[in-house]
Amino acid sequence: VSEMHLAGVMILAGSDSPNPYCIPGSSLHDELELLVDAGLSPMVALQTATQNAAVYLGRSDVGTIEAGNVADLVLLDSDPLANIANTRTIAGVMLRGRWVNKQTIERMLNESRLTAQVENFGGSWERDYTKIGQPVSQVSFANTQINHESLSVVAEFIHLRRLNLFNTSTADA
């Protein structure tokens, strides 16, 4: 990888895709660390996911922090140039000019984990923001079999307002 970079090959980070067992976000941190392990500097590794990606896509309004560019960026608590693993120290994200704090990011990640667990049990999850600005969750196990373990996952949803058990049977845990 280092020799390709020195030869002028533009390297792009690319593991942040919908492949099985690739978790968007987390897999990108892993890839950046692997690129540094392969001989790239932390700065060049970061550019594979930002500036190089923008150049490849033909976009001049993303990939760098400049006046007039799209306001999408990740703010870190620690310097990734000192240690590329510091890309995991996320303080918040600016997304389309809107600030998303660490607490909100952690809640969203937790909900994603819980959603995957509900789906593993054959259920579904839905979030509705139309109720006075308050998020409302609905978990459905309609036409599935539930047990103690699946119900314990449901109990972790903070804003659960509806639980649909239509045509649901129970099983021993």
Image: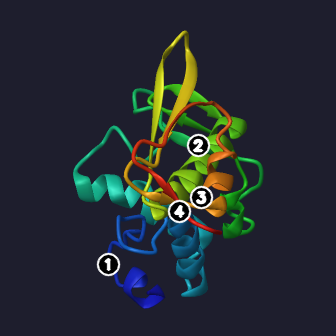
Q: Earlier in the sequence, mark 1 or mark 4?
A: 1
Q: How far apart are marks 1 and 3 (CA)?
A: 49 Å
Q: Name the residue under label 4.
A: 46
Q: How far apart are marks 2 and 1 (CA)?
A: 36 Å
Q: Earlier in the sequence, mark 3 or mark 2?
A: 2
Percent across and percent down for residue 95 are 49, 34
Type of amino acid at the residue the image marks with label 2? Met
Type of amino acid at the residue the image marks with label 1? Val
Badge 1 marks a residue whose secondary structure is loop
Viewer-nearest of discs 2 and 1: 2
Percent across and percent down for residue 75 are 65, 43
Q: Residue at x 68, y 63 (%)?
A: 81
Percent across and percent down for residue 148 are 66, 60
Q: Name the residue under label 3.
A: 150
User: Which residue occupies the foreground of this view, 163 or 71?
Assistant: 163
Q: Which of marks 4 and 2 is nearer the N terminus?
A: 4
Task: Tell me whether the residue at label 3 lies in contact with that at label 4, contact meaning CB atoms closer than 8 angstroms.
Answer: no
Q: Earlier in the sequence, mark 2 or mark 1?
A: 1
Q: Which residue lies furthest to the left in this view?
A: 58
Task: Tell me whether the residue at label 1 lies in contact with that at label 4, contact meaning CB atoms closer than 8 angstroms.
Answer: no
Badge 4 marks a residue whose secondary structure is helix
In this rendering, position of residue 105 left or right of residue 141: right
Residue 22 drawn above or below residue 90: below
Q: Name the residue under label 2.
A: 108
Residue 134 drawn above or below residue 147: above
Q: Residue at x 35, y 84 (%)?
A: 7
Residue 9: mark in rendering: 1
Type of amino acid at the residue the image marks with label 4? Leu
Q: How far apart are marks 3 and 4 (CA)?
A: 40 Å
Viewer-nearest of discs 3 and 2: 3
